[in-house]
Image (cartoon, rainbow, N blue to C red):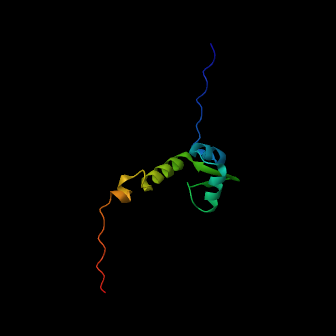
Amino acid sequence: MSAPHPPRLETSFLNLQKAAEYLGLSPNTLYIWRHRRQGPPSFRMGRRVMYRISALDKWVRDQEVSDSRSNAALNPLAQKPQRRAKSSR
């Protein structure tokens, strides 16, 4: 009988390459977003850029909520038409 394997430690953060794979994006996209201060939040750990998995998940949820195609409440076609203001000519 073999010895049981020790519990596998799951990290709570990913480097740029792994974060890009996690999100289905290219590493270059994340790199550009980071320098434009866009995209998911990141931080430096030594010389490496890291992303918390929980922050990536929250960022994806926030993108879904703010997108009118995913959030019916933001769909402009679901809004009542607005009346034009009467002009005072």
Instruction: Say how many tags the image has.
Output: 0
| Vertical placement of residue 10 versus 53, above or below | above
Could you say which is closer to the camera, residue 21 or residue 53?
A: 21
Find residue 82 and report its horizontal and vertical position in percent: 30, 68
Q: Measuring 38% from the left and 56% from the top, which residue is drawn there?
A: 75
Q: Measuring 65% from the left and 49% from the top, which residue is drawn there?
A: 27
Q: Residue furthest right?
A: 47
Q: Measuring 38% from the left and 57% from the top, which residue is drawn there?
A: 74
Place residue 13 in its image quadrant. top right
| Vertical placement of residue 16 versus 35, above or below | above
Confirm whether residue 80 shows in the render.
yes
Find residue 57 and report its horizontal and vertical position in percent: 50, 47
Q: Residue furthest bottom?
A: 89
Place residue 73 in its image quadrant. bottom left
Could you say which is closer to the camera, residue 38 or residue 53?
A: 38
Confirm whether residue 46 shows in the render.
no
Q: Residue furthest front?
A: 89
Locate the N terminus by quadrant.
top right
Locate the C terminus by quadrant.
bottom left
Place residue 10 in its image quadrant. top right
Q: Measuring 66% from the left and 53% from the top, which residue is drawn there?
A: 28
Is 64 positioned to the left or the right of 77 in the image? right
